[in-house]
Amino acid sequence: QVQPVESGGGLVQAGGSLRLSCVVPGRTFSGYTMGWFRQAPGGEREFVAAITWTGRSTNYAESVKGRFTISRDNAKNTVYLQMDTLKPEDTAVYYCARHSNGVNTSPNIDDYRYWGQGTQVTVSS
């Protein structure tokens, strides 16, 4: 069973930073693109960022470009989301997920197969 585990969420003031981590146990991390999504109260789950297995290609939602950075450490089976210049509208539960392949950074939620439980990020104004 592939079960990513997210951590690093919390409460931060607008303009602040947080770094989310996601660990995928076992051998199911190797070779796959990883993505971050978020879901605000009453909203749909939306794409935030994705990174290919090699780390050479990334993709970001327009709303976070220039503020968020996705990275990964394959030796630690971990993907990160560095979030800077946070805004109140970034408030959401953040989820990481494993893509069905390792070369595509699509924002399509249906391309992601395994999801974590999420970590809450709250940005106060």
Image (spheres, rainbow, N blue to C red):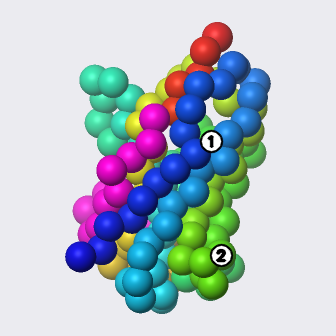
State the image quarter where residue 2 is shown: bottom left
Q: Name the residue beneath numbered marker 1.
A: 64
State whether residue 71 is above or below residue 83.
Answer: below
Q: Residue at x 32, y 67 (%)?
A: 3
Q: Name the residue beneath numbered marker 2.
A: 73
Which mark is nearer the camera, 1 or 2?
A: 2
Left or right of 15 in this view: 33: left
Under circle 2, the secondary element is strand
Q: Residue at x 70, y 20 (%)?
A: 14
Quadrant where the N terminus lies?
bottom left
Quadrant where the C terminus lies?
top right
Q: Position of residue 31 (x, y in %)?
A: 48, 88
Mark 1: amino acid: Val
Q: Position of residue 116 (x, y in %)?
A: 35, 57
Left or right of 82 in this view: 21: left
Q: Residue at x 57, y 66 (%)?
A: 79
**Residue 112 showing in the rendered view:** no
Q: Residue placed farthest to the top in the image?
A: 125
The answer for how far apart the CA atoms under marks 1 and 2 are is: 21 Å
Q: Position of residue 7 (x, y in %)?
A: 52, 50
State whether residue 59 is above or below residue 43.
Answer: below
- Residue 47's tag is none
Left or right of 16 in this view: 49: left
Left or right of 21 in this view: 18: right
Q: Which residues are magenta?
A: 106-120
